[in-house]
Amino acid sequence: MKRILLILGILCWGFTFSQTNWEIVNSGTINKLNDIQFTSNYIGYVVGENGTILKTLDGGNSWSDISITTNEFINSISFINDNIGYLSTQNRIYKTIDGGINWTIKTEDLVNNFNTIKFLTEQIGFIGTDSNIFKTTNGSQNWINIKTTLSNINTISFPTSNTGFFTGGSSSGYVYKTTDQGSTIGTIINPYNTIREEIQFLDNNIGYLIGWYNPYILKTTNGGTSWFEINMDYAGGMAVHFLTEQIGYHIDNSGGNSKIFGTNDGGLNWNNELTFASSSSYGLKKFVSNSTSVLCIGDNGIIYKKSLTLSNYSFATNNNIKIYPNPTANIINVEEINKEGTLTNYIIYNLIGQEIVKGKINNNQIDLQYISDGAYILKLGDKNQTFKIIKEQ
């Protein structure tokens, strides 16, 4: 395994949409990349074919190879923090507790194909297969079939710890939903049966579906009860990724080209931000974002990265928190999108990591009137949500 140098950092920025270009990042591999996840603003993981696992410690600017004793195609990855994570190959589940240095096999199954994996805690996780949804409550020691499905399950989205959505595969438009962490699962039939490639929810109500044979993205604002079209002009959607309701991206692999489109108005208008011909042998697969950038992965080890710039609206990595205005003269407003009520405390640091002030969040506001003008790091609650904030007159 390649040795990688951990550069300690504290700065975690809050950003929004910018017009900067997509830049190619050297991944160090030509293998097909299939899944990507960031556990913080700096630490992220990518997996793919031939046992490929890549790790970044600098927000995706550089990547190092992590060794694993398999040459299998790694379908999916799910980390619950910087060190503890799971990955799935076709028939195996692996676990690491040391940031990918070592991996142990937790599950082997020669019957089911493990298409996608999602862990909420170290013990509670879900697997989507060709015809089932499985759940574990003991860290992959045992799995229980909680739903026999009418289509493949290739994508899982849990906007909160209890509410989750499952879909993907074949030609059906079925979406499966739980509101009690998998104890019960209901079936949603969206009106566009071929939409199936990827599902993403920003919160319990607002979600998106993209499908290969449809020239639009579907959006719901009521948790999947009803859907409406967001026109994207092309049939060939592979992935959708919204940072907020207004700012989003989708991949289109139709017509012999692979393209990234971006919107700044909720999908009313889309800008073609990146295009390359299929002769490049690069097909795009999936997005991920942290608080500083959006990344896109695909075939032949391709990784594209787009930087995000500071604006008057900031969002956390998991899109559950908004702070505004930023910059501010005195007051920072804090809005928790999922209304879980977990944000009660705050700490403000200077840019070298020294604590400046801490206190309680009162009426969803933080008063900065007694802090000197300048840049600071704001840490919210016990979930380590962090933002760069600017105090200025």
Image (spheres, rainbow, N blue to C red):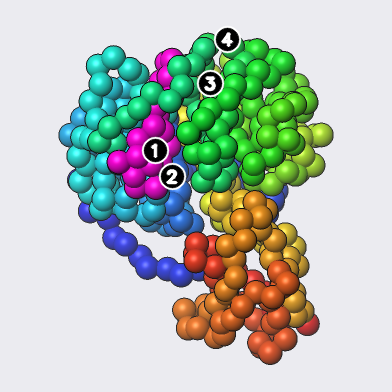
Which is nearer the eye, 294 or 168? 168
- Residue 192 percent across, percent down from the top left: 70, 15
Q: Quadrant of the C terminus?
A: bottom right
Q: Secondary structure at mark 3?
A: loop
Question: What stretch of residues is rendered in magenta?
Answer: 117-138
Earlier in the chain: of badge 4 and badge 1, it is: 1
Cα separation, mark 4 vs mark 3, equals 9 Å
Left or right, 143 with reference to 233: left
Residue 125 tag number? 1
Under mark 2, the amino acid is Leu
Circle 4 SS class: loop
What label sits on residue 168 in the rendered view? Answer: 3
Mark 4 lies on residue = 171
Query: Dot 4: within a 10 Å radius of its alpha carbon, few (fewer than 14), some, or many (20 or more) residues?
Result: some
SS type, badge 1:
strand
Disc 4 to disc 1, C-alpha distance = 26 Å
**For residue 50, which quarter of the picture?**
top left
* Residue at image coords 32%, 29%: 143
Q: Of the residues tagged 1 and 3, which is closer to the observer? A: 1
- For marks 1 and 2, the one nearer the N-term is 2
Q: Earlier in the sequence, mark 2 or mark 4?
A: 2
